[in-house]
Image (cartoon, rainbow, N blue to C red):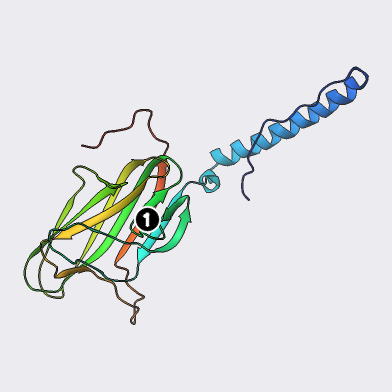
Amino acid sequence: MRLQKVEPPRLPDAAPEYIRRVADTMTNVIRLYFNRLSYAVNALVGANGGQFVECPYGLFFNTLPVALTAINTAHTIAVPTTYLGNSVLVDSTFTSRIYVTVSGVYNFQFSGQLKSTSSSSKQVWVWIRRSLADIGYSTHQYTLAGSGNHMEISWNFDIDMQEGQFIELLWASDSTDVTLEAAAASGPHPGIPSVVIAVNFVSPLPDILPVPP
């Protein structure tokens, strides 16, 4: 059962000839209000209170391989498919951009599957961009070698976001012989996404916003 929003009651105006009736009505209104308020508070502080809390969230993924067209060049990582979304959404045109419609601190959980298509060693870099501005010191570096070899990469980070801002993950490599690989279902396993990004609301924004390094 979902919690109902609690709002202060509108108390009736008292007229001299109906003072007793108005007093009774007011008492009933106040009793109903406090009954609802008590139910809401007791439900939230109970052992399973978290089930009644609704926060922004999203889960997005890509079922296609993601390739690089040039070395040492930033490329966005698209996540065009939405599995879950509540006040967090992917731009329908620029499917690498994940927007929030509620200001707050958000946790992003990224995972991807790198595939090497040549034997040589190659460097891969992944980093965060917020509303077209790269976040300082946000880069992760990976080394991959061996033709046909795979490497799972994952990343979990918190970041402050204003309503209407978006996050993109970007990547680059010193070789085009690497992809974020996807695969169709093939017994005994289901399909493999190239990228998965989960987003969860953590808390309201702090009074003083941090400045990226």
Q: Residue at x 44, y 62 (%)?
A: 83
Query: Residue 47 versus residue 1: which sits nearer the camera?
Result: 1
Q: Quadrant of residue 106?
A: top left
Q: Residue furthest front?
A: 93
Neighbourhood count class around disc 1 (C-alpha, 10 Å): few under 14, some 14–19, many 20 upward? some
Residue 28, image x, y percentages: 80, 31
Query: Residue 46 versus residue 8: which sits nearer the camera?
Result: 8
Q: Residue furthest top?
A: 16
Q: Quadrant of residue 11?
A: top right
Residue 48, image x, y percentages: 53, 46
Height in image: 72 above or below 6? Answer: below
Amino acid identity at mark 1: Ala
Q: Is residue 71 left or right of residue 16?
A: left
Element type where label 1 sits in the image: strand
Q: Residue at x 32, y 62 (%)?
A: 78
Q: Is residue 193 left or right of residue 139?
A: right
Height in image: 148 above or below 43? Answer: below
Question: Which part of the image, by quadrant, shows the C terminus?
Answer: top left
Query: Residue 127 versus residue 2: which sits nearer the camera?
Result: 127
Residue 44, image x, y percentages: 56, 40
Residue 160, image x, y percentages: 34, 40
Height in image: 16 above or below 192? Answer: above
Q: Residue furthest bottom?
A: 187
Q: Residue at x 51, y 45 (%)?
A: 50
Pointer 1 residue: 198
Height in image: 207 above or below 196? Answer: above
Q: Residue furthest left?
A: 120
Q: How many marks?
A: 1
